[in-house]
């Protein structure tokens, strides 16, 4: 078991950035305003958004500790695809555009940096053992959706890792589950695109750990999404992606959504 | 039926081949528990059914509500992620709604149906339970082609129209059914078939159709409809080197039947696939020497809703 550094809360935990440098910048400022002492990002830095190199200096300057997502692993090692495991041809076509763009536009320097990222970060905060990872603690690209993950299953995953609090991303949709022993399992959502709810805000999680039981707030964050749309168009990224940024509805990568999450969206 | 000659008999070892233990897969975790809730009893008699279900196939019988409740209770300690109901045709069971309500207290549910027997008094309580639960209820409707011309020769006269009416009904109850199609057409027609499916489904008002195409399993009645597995179509030890076993259903699932717990929904007619009579007994590793294992090896966890877990990235 690696040593767990003691940290003081609150902890700001960001999910996938998807090259959305404007949301990342806004999230760092927002977290500082909320007196977050530690900042983390759970991976999937590229894909979807414009100019992938822009986010790396922001992460470094703000001292954000970063976990390796499946996207980062693919880009770092120049694999054939993003390892999301889509089966729908339309989803795969859009994933391909996004992946090829990110791969060619990420400099070797940052690809090498991503190749050094850990798959998990463990800290001890307020006496709680906190585990941060990308998809699930057992698998980088496992999708943990609210409606398809039983509480007994999440509890099993947390206990297998000796963790009181587990924080993941990867799906794009945030949720919080209280575990039977008082622990928490949290999907922090993503900064990269809205939560398929018809609003343009993106999400991150703020974990408070200092007194008693851990508590988490899913923060809804507005940023200059029109500027992002402008930059995406300038980079000739698919209009379907731009539409998501401007409307808050997902237009691609929909087949992986379970029934409940799919029903809440427009498409 | 258990007495059918399985395609496995077709393989003859090459001369001089050394007998060795075949590859096996451990149960890494019991993520998914299946219930073969109506046994091999089905209102249809599809020509490609891998377990030869029919109205008169009583090889496997119904599970009672009380039995299902017992299994649900036992499953809690395993941290089961989700539950699947199959048959036969699950909607032939009068207690299906009560079972689903009970299951949703623990986790998400998937129901595999042929869509031709969907009485309101069974669909309505399930729809209500689904709305009230935090967990998803996935309705998987089997339709093997986007037209009566393609579907009906396989599934029976009139079944395309009846299943499409079933899809319409499920939509009216607020479900977003996943249409599950066994690939009974040549692979080169995949794209065309997918497009036609979308058009047909939109035609009955399904504006965002969900479609899952399954590879065929060449056992049960299917080996007579088309052909069985050839001698080379078998998982070997070498094929498991560098292979991610988490992609296989047998690494994360078991199925409860009236005749005990089996390794997966496909192999219930094979005595060696009966793992025992408690979840503990059924947690042992499984020898994947069956011919149908080859199809899973090629395609991943074909029975799951959202495809295979995929290879681990790190």
Image (cartoon, coloured by chain):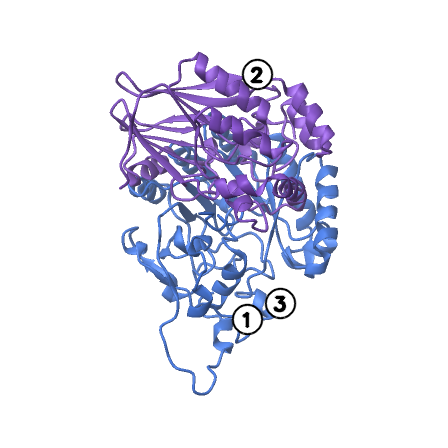
Chain colours: A purple, B blue
Residue A128 badge = none
Category of crowding for the residue at label 2, using alpha-carbon neighbours closer than 10 angstroms: few (below 14), some (14–19), many (at least 20):
some
Q: Nearer the viewer, residue A10 or A62?
A: A62
- On screen, residue A146 versus residue A87, left or right, reads left
Q: Residue at x 45, y 17 (%)?
A: A31
Q: Position of residue A228 (x, y in %)?
A: 65, 24
Q: Chain of mark 1?
A: B
Up-down relation of residue A113 to residue B268 (above or below): above
Up-down relation of residue B61 to residue A40 (above or below): below
| Contact (Cβ within 8 Å) of mark 2 with mark 1 | no
| Contact (Cβ within 8 Å) of mark 3 with mark 1 | no
Q: Secondary structure at mark 2?
A: loop
Q: Residue at x 45, y 70 (%)?
A: B3
The Cα–Cα distance between marks 2 and 3, rounded to whole angstroms, is 58 Å
Q: Nearer the viewer, residue A22 or A209?
A: A22
Q: Nearer the viewer, mark 2 or mark 1?
A: 2
Residue A222 badge = 2
- On screen, residue B221 versus residue A175, left or right, reads right
Q: Are marks 2 and 3 on the same chain?
A: no
Q: Position of residue A99 (x, y in %)?
A: 62, 42
Instruction: Report the residue marked by disc 3.
Output: B225
Q: Nearer the viewer, residue A151 or A61?
A: A61
Q: Nearer the viewer, mark 2 or mark 3?
A: 2
Which residue lies most toward the bottom here? Answer: B15
- On screen, residue B211 versus residue A119, left or right, reads right
Q: Nearer the viewer, mark 3 or mark 1?
A: 1
Residue B306 visible here? no
Q: Quadrant of residue B157?
A: bottom right
Instruction: Report the residue marked by disc 1.
Output: B229
Q: Chain of mark 2?
A: A
């Amino acid at each position: 078991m690696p040593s767990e550094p003691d940290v003081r809360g609150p902890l700001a935990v960001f999910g996938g950035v998807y090259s959305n440098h404007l949301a990342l910048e806004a999230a760092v400022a927002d977290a500082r305003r909320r007196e977050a002492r530690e900042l983390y990002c759970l991976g999937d830095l590229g894909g979807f958004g414009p100019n992938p190199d822009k986010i790396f200096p922001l992460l470094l300057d703000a001292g954000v500790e970063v976990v390796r997502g499946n996207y980062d692993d693919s880009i770092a090692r120049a694999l054939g695809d993003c390892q999301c495991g889509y089966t729908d041809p339309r989803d795969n076509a859009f994933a391909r555009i996004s992946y090829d763009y990110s791969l060619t536009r990420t400099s070797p320097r940052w690809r090498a940096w991503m190749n050094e990222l850990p798959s998990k970060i463990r800290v001890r905060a307020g006496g709680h053992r906190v585990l941060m990872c990308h998809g699930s603690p057992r698998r980088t690209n496992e999708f943990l959706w609210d409606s398809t993950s039983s509480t007994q299953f999440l509890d099993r995953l947390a206990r297998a890792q000796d963790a009181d609090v587990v924080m993941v991303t990867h799906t794009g949709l945030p949720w919080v589950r209280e575990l039977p022993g008082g622990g928490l399992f949290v999907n922090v959502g993503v900064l990269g695109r809205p939560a398929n709810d018809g609003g343009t805000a993106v999400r991150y999680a703020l974990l408070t750990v200092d007194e008693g039981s851990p508590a988490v707030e899913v923060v809804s964050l507005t940023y200059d999404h029109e500027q992002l749309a402008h930059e995406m168009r300038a980079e000739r990224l698919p209009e379907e992606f731009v539409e998501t940024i401007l409307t808050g509805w997902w237009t691609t990568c929909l087949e992986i959504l379970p029934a409940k999450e799919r029903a809440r969206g427009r498409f | 039926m258990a007495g059918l000659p399985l395609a496995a008999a077709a393989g003859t070892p090459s001369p001089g081949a050394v007998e060795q233990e075949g590859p096996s897969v451990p149960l890494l975790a019991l993520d998914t528990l299946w219930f073969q809730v109506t046994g091999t009893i089905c209102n249809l008699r599809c020509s490609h059914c891998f377990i030869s279900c029919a109205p008169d196939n009583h090889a496997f019988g119904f599970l009672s509500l009380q039995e299902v409740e017992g299994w649900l209770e036992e499953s809690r300690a395993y941290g089961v992620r989700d539950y699947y109901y199959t048959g036969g045709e699950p909607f032939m069971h009068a207690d299906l709604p009560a079972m689903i309500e009970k299951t949703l207290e623990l986790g998400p549910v998937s129901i595999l149906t042929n869509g031709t027997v969907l009485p309101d008094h069974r669909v309505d309580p399930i729809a209500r339970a689904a709305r009230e639960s935090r967990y998803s209820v996935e309705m998987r409707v089997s339709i093997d082609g986007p037209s009566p011309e393609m579907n009906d020769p396989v599934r029976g006269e009139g079944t395309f129209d009846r299943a499409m009416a079933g899809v319409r009904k499920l939509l009216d109850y607020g479900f977003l059914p996943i249409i599950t199609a066994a690939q009974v057409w040549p692979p080169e027609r995949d794209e065309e078939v997918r497009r036609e499916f979308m058009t047909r489904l939109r035609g009955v008002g399904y504006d965002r159709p969900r479609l899952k195409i399954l590879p065929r399993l060449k056992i049960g009645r299917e080996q007579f409809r088309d052909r069985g597995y050839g001698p080379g179509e078998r998982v070997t030890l070498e094929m498991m080197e560098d292979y991610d076993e988490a992609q296989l259903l047998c690494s994360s699932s078991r199925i409860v039947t009236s005749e005990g717990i089996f390794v997966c929904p496909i192999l219930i007619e094979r005595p060696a696939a009966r793992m025992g009579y408690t979840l503990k007994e059924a947690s042992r590793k499984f020898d994947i020497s069956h011919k149908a294992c080859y199809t899973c090896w090629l395609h991943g966890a074909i029975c799951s809703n959202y495809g295979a877990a995929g290879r681990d990235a790190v």
